[in-house]
Amino acid sequence: MKIVLHFLLPLALGAVTLAQTAADRFTQFDKNGDGKLTREEFPAAKIFDGADADKDGLLTREEIAAYFRKQQPGTTTTPTTPPAPEPSKPAMSPAASVEIVETLNVPYATIDGVEPNLLSLDIHAPKDAKGLPVVMYVHGGYWKAGDKSQKGHLPEFFCRRGFVFVTLNYRLAPAVKHPVLIQDVARAVAWVHDHIATHGGDAAQLFLTGHSAGAQLVALLGTDAKRLGEQGKPLSILRGVIPLDSAAMDIRSVAAADRRADSPYRAAFGDDPAAWADASPIVYAESAKALPPFQIVVAYGPAIANKKAGVDAFAAALRKNRTRAEVLDASSFREHQSLMTEFGAESDPVSAAMLEFIESVRSGKAIAGLGSERVLKPTGEAAAAAAKQLEAYRLRVLMMQFDKNKDGRITKDEMSANPFLFDRMDADKDSIVTADELSAYEQAKDAPTKPKTSTVAP
């Protein structure tokens, strides 16, 4: 095997030269330049297993050099196991109580004629914070609504675990269109990178997340290097990107399919297909290399199959270019809104998985492999509560779909397009479908089908 030969050739050299040559060869295989080799980057399994001294599934330069020094005839070395990289500061216990210092409405840019609040951010930090990792959050709202104050339990969740948390505003459609929105987010990230140390944050440990429309924006910023480049920053300042439930990884397809007069896609991205492509994270994921690792979360909602397909395509594009992309499927217990309202709650699998991802990146272990899909499920009382919430959401969606006059009941006239379905829902046959009947129908429809049994005469 060519890889094996390239590394075995230096065995004829002296120990010092051997170690140096092995280190030089390291660069040849380190495709993403992260200073570590995965099994995919270095498929010589026998050498990999022998050199992986700490058995973390990654090879460092030191491990490679140490391995080949031990192969050198007549050379004796004292085996050493290089320590795994340590986070700048250990995450605090989930139960830790901490005083949070809020610094609100901090301007990250000043532009003539623009309301200052739209170009501002809020910083939440544990008291006496110093050198803590940073999580930045971009709100959703179909690119035309929302505010940085809509942050749920995120500040408390992250600050209690030893993070500085930042949430930001950006200009909204239809007053502005792409690329203004993403340019504002890039400005905010650049400001945080320059100034967060004065608020106790570590600019070298910067993670970016966003929900809904905000998820599209963080995915775009994490794949299109020119956006941060316009602010004089490399894409490498982002340690990880976590989009929370976006159906817009490909603006081209969703904008073309949305023919509504008040289409939020056209309000934010216009009517030019070239602008749609420029705003599509998947376009850059298909060609970019050396991107930060991604964790992409999917929740339940209308057209869930289409959303899931879009996320899977985006993740596949990232992985094709050697970027780690982990997909978290939370659709069995979280819908679009409860994904945020329940984030950080006790026993919430989504927030636990996000924290796990961030810590794995900080420790250097998230680079091992290219990621895969994980299906998340709550347990115990949390599972029952999540099931009720999801059922209530489905019920609200159905009522909104059929209850034209919003009186909380569905008449046969309101479902004239599907009288057969109405008859099945109308359990008491009073020509009115109530919310309870609708819920009962949905539960019965989703219940497992009992296998048919047959009786054989003796």
Image (cartoon, rainbow, N blue to C red):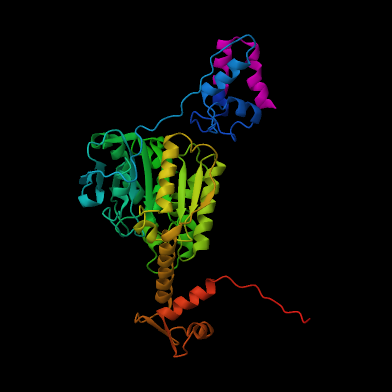
x%, y% of residue 246? 43, 56
Q: Is residue 19 above or below residue 292?
A: above
Name the side, left or right, on which 159 lies relative to 52. Answer: left
Q: Name the residue nearer the viewer: 337 or 91.
A: 91
Find the residue positioned furthest to the front: 458
x%, y% of residue 103? 20, 44
All told, the count of numbered labels is 0
Q: Name the residue nearer the viewer: 255 or 322.
A: 322
Q: Is residue 69 above or below residue 389?
A: above
Name the side, left or right, on which 152 lies relative to 28. Answer: left
Q: Could you tell me if residue 113 is visible in this image?
A: no
The quadrant of the image that shows the C terminus is bottom right
Residue 418 within the magenta-colored segment of the rendering = no
Most common secondary structure along the magenta stretch: helix
Which residue is drawn at the image coordinates 48% and 52% (left, top)? Answer: 328
The quadrant of the image that shows the N terminus is top right
Q: Could you tell me if residue 341 is visible in this image?
A: yes
x%, y% of residue 346? 37, 53
Residue 2 within the magenta-colored segment of the rendering = yes
Span of residues in magenta? 1-25
Q: Name the residue nearer the viewer: 163 or 232.
A: 163
x%, y% of residue 403? 39, 80
Find the residue positioned furthest to the right: 458
Q: Is residue 337 above or below residue 92?
A: below
